[in-house]
Image (cartoon, helix red, strand yellow):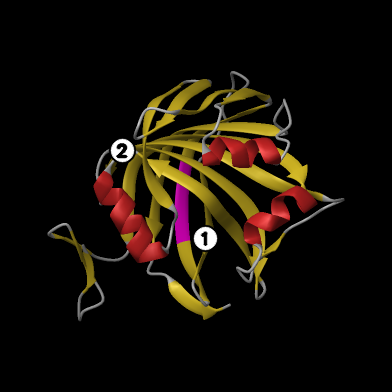
Amino acid sequence: MASLLEDGSWEIQGRRVTFPVRITEASAACATYLVRTHRARPLVAGTGLDLVSVAGRTPLFLVLVDYRVNDLGDYDEVGVAFLARHRGRVGPYISQLPVTQGFTMEAGRALWGLPKWLGRAELSIVGRDATCHLTDDAGAHVLTAAIHTLPGRLPLPLRGGLSALAPRGDEVLVSPVRARLSGVRLGRGGSVVLGAGHPMADELRALGLPRRPLLTTIVDRVAFDMDRAESVPR
């Protein structure tokens, strides 16, 4: 059970979580696709969010993350996000976020309104290749993904920030993230095989996910801080 304490920190499963929540060691892979905006729009209906659209297409991000050292434990995560807009802010709206540990599931839901649910992921991110076989907690196949990049890495580390957008009831939670990336590789190689009958797989299938990503990215070392969510009226 998650409880908000008087000092603004949270107690989750007997552990106290303070802000900013720090992720100090992780690796990540991302495949970026362009999907038809009219197919994705039902996913944000009634949330107060608008999808960013260029020539009738909206960016979709399939993200794989191997978290090793951070305030929420050691776990794997698979995310599906869209670029969205709310009251002048532009940031990722995450529609699906299976994770492999219960603590981070409860924390993500309570602190930032993220749609985390328990799954099982056989995840590998090594060099220019990343693979993931994702099932739900009952063992039903959700997806199998492969992400590949070109051999070279960008010569300098990158720093940046974004604000995650998470609708919850009559509000939108806006959560600032400050990230530091090193060992960044880019490419266009990747594939996704979807399971049958699972809601996340059905959601991706209905979007008409292209066979080839627009861009792929693999990051050897990811660190970021995530601040307290700001509640903004829908």
Q: Nearer the viewer, residue 150 or 190?
A: 190
Q: Residues within 10 Å of mark 1 (few under 14, many from 20)?
A: many
Q: Is residue 49 visible?
A: yes
Q: Residue at x 49, y 23 (%)?
A: 130
Picture coordinates of residue 230 (x, y %)? 45, 75
Q: Are marks 2 and 1 in contact (CB under 8 Å)?
A: no
Picture coordinates of residue 120 (x, y %)? 36, 31
Outermost residue, right side: 55
Reading the chain from its start, which is encountered first: label 2 or label 1?
A: 2
Q: Residue at x 36, y 56 (%)?
A: 108
Q: Relative to 119, is 22 above or below?
A: below
Residue 215 placement: quadrant: top right
Picture coordinates of residue 55 (x, y %)? 87, 50
Q: Residue at x 64, y 55 (%)?
A: 43
Residue 27 placement: quadrant: top left
Query: Which amino acid type corresponds to the residue marked 2 in the rendered image?
Result: Tyr
Query: Which amino acid type corresponds to the residue marked 1 in the rendered image?
Result: Ala
Q: What residue is pinned by disc 1? A: 164
Q: What residue is pinned by disc 2? A: 75
Asked whether 56 falls inside the magenta stretch, the response is: no
Outermost residue, front side: 197
Can you say which quadrant of the picture contains the C terminus? Answer: bottom right
Q: Is residue 72 visible?
A: no
Q: Which residues are magenta?
A: 177-181
Q: Relative to 10, is 189 above or below?
A: above
Can you say which quadrant of the picture contains the N terminus? Answer: bottom left
Q: Label 2 to label 1, Cα distance in Å?
A: 20 Å
